[in-house]
């Protein structure tokens, strides 16, 4: 784990926020969101940030150009194609979300910071200690209804580099949808007239069926008869929670993998490995009652999942197209068993995600009235955005030094790419109660530095050992 220096002294001067509207007339209409978009748990704002050095020497055509002006103009052009993002959300009588495509625009802030890129140092890693400086929360702009769906701040640095920070209403896009929009913005900044991938709305593709029918078990949502939503919220005391980055380099990830039996070492993905490791270390750190049921819900992308009915969504779809099936265990079993136990549970949860699963989620939203995801201290939601390609966005000045979600949330963490000593690694912003942080650090240290001996035995020994725990 790494600490960051958040004591830098610098100033950010901002211009008055403005609304950037589509550069050409766009349809004036109302579009309904899907029943996957429309979930109660999607009604929040997600901040994403990109850090760019001054690499204009690598592209002579961009020398002397102002990134603020270039991006502002490109934004107006991109919104011609993504015109719903320039609208505002409204509700019908059943709280169904719809976009009033009125062309009111996206909120844009021009800013200057009296600091260089190099001076920022490790503070570019999430959670960003200067997020409020690089993404000003314009008063009255952060609601779900009747507010701009995107807020963008572009901040020039003294060295010629710049920072683009963005806040997105999650009901409109998932990580892949946001990347598609931002990539179009980058293409327009470099002179393109049309997006390489035309946007596709078609939110009705992920609506509930008629009649709706819940066909899968969904541990990620409260049970309709036994779970009280307010009780679950009260169970999570956020007053003493702190956030910090967990950074793992390739050697540490290999060390974690060495704790698995041979058949899992070669078959589990990095996502499954890190999700299981985080789940187990976090549960140990929280020191929960061994009988308490804990769970980790991993966001699984529905794009490209084949079924007998074909693909769930077409190329160009930029709405939310994921579900988060849960791995569930009693805390005592999770903590006493080797890491392979958690990996097996995560793999099983991930394997059940298919078209039928996401359609069952849409139907559940209609039948149960859009319940939020389960809110308990023993529940964590994990989103792996390492494949969302945020780090591939080039506005003409080269690729970013770092890009990703700027912060985690008390029950949500994100896996993001991060360079550690020149090597590819992963960074995760973690929220924990203050008293649990040191226990978490020690558990991570154990599993990333100690080479276990028990897995050097035979599979027969392993099964016997596991059965006794």
Image (cartoon, rainbow, N blue to C red):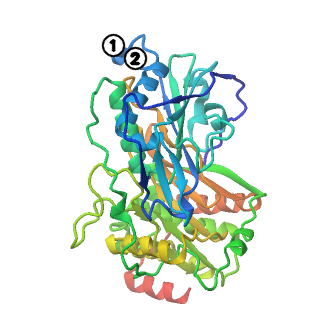
Q: Secondary structure at mark 1?
A: helix
Q: Residue at x 25, y 63 (%)?
A: 311
Q: Position of residue 438 (x, y in %)?
A: 71, 58
Q: Residue at x 58, y 53 (%)?
A: 44
Q: Position of residue 301 (x, y in %)?
A: 38, 60
- In this rendering, the answer to whether 42 lies above or below 350 is above
Q: Residue at x 64, y 69 (%)?
A: 375
For the residues labelled 2 and 1, say whether their Cβ atoms are less than 8 Å apart. Answer: yes
Q: How many numbered dots are placed on residues in this image?
A: 2
Task: State the image quarter where residue 10 is shown.
Answer: top right
Query: How many neighbours does mark 1 have within 10 angstroms: few (below 14), some (14-19), or many (20 or more)?
Result: few
- In this rendering, the answer to whether 314 lies above or below 345 is above
- In this rendering, the answer to whether 45 lies above or below 188 is below
Q: Is residue 450 visible?
A: no
The residue pinned by badge 2 equals 56
Query: How many neighbours does mark 2 have within 10 angstroms: few (below 14), some (14-19), or many (20 or more)?
Result: some
Viewer-side residue, 102 vs 199: 102
Label disc, if present, on residue 165 of the rendered structure: none
Q: Secondary structure at mark 2?
A: helix
Viewer-side residue, 364 vs 32: 32
Q: Is residue 41 visible?
A: yes
The residue pinned by badge 1 equals 60
């Amino acid at each position: 784990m790494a600490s960051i220096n958040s004591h830098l002294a610098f100033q950010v001067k901002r211009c008055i926020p403005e609304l950037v509207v589509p550069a050409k007339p766009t349809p004036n209409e109302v579009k309904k969101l899907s029943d996957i978009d429309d979930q109660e748990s999607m009604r929040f704002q997600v901040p994403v940030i990109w850090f760019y050095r001054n690499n204009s020497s690598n592209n002579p055509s961009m020398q002397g150009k102002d990134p603020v002006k270039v991006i502002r103009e490109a934004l107006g052009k991109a919104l011609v194609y993504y015109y719903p993002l320039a609208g505002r959300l409204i509700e019908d009588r059943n709280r169904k979300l719809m976009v009033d495509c009125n062309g009111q625009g996206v909120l844009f802030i021009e800013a200057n910071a009296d600091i260089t890129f190099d001076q920022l140092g490790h503070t570019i890693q999430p959670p960003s200690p200067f997020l409020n400086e690089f993404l000003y929360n314009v008063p009255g702009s952060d609601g779900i209804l009747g507010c701009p769906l995107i807020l963008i701040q572009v901040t020039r640095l003294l060295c010629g580099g710049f920072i683009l920070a963005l806040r997105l209403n999650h009901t409109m896009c998932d990580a892949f949808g946001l990347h598609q929009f931002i990539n179009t913005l980058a293409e327009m900044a470099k002179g393109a007239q049309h997006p390489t991938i035309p946007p596709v709305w078609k939110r009705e593709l992920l609506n509930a069926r008629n009649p709706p029918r819940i066909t899968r078990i969904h541990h990620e949502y409260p049970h309709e008869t036994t779970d009280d939503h307010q009780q679950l919220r009260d169970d999570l005391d956020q007053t003493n929670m702190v956030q910090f980055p967990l950074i793992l380099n390739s050697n540490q990830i290999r060390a974690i993998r060495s704790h698995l039996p041979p058949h899992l070492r070669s078959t589990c993905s990095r996502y499954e490995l890190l999700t299981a490791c985080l789940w187990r270390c976090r549960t140990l750190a929280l020191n929960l009652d061994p009988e308490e049921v804990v769970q980790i819900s991993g966001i699984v992308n529905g794009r490209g999942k084949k079924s007998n009915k074909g693909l769930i969504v077409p190329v160009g779809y930029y709405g939310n197209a994921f579900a988060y099936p849960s791995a569930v265990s009693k805390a005592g079993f999770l903590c006493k068993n080797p890491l392979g136990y958690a990996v097996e549970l995560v793999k099983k949860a991930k394997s059940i995600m298919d078209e039928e699963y996401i359609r069952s989620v849409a139907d559940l939203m209609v039948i149960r009235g859009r319940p939020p995801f389960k809110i308990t201290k023993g529940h964590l939601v994990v989103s792996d955005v390492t494949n969302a390609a945020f780090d591939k966005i080039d506005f003409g000045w080269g690729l970013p030094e770092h890009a990703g979600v700027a912060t985690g949330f008390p029950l949500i963490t994100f896996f993001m790419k991060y360079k550690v000593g020149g090597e590819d690694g992963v960074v995760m912003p973690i929220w924990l109660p203050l008293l649990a942080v040191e226990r978490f650090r020690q558990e991570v240290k154990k599993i990333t530095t100690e080479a276990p001996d028990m897995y050097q035995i035979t599979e027969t020994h392993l099964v016997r050992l596991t059965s006794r725990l």
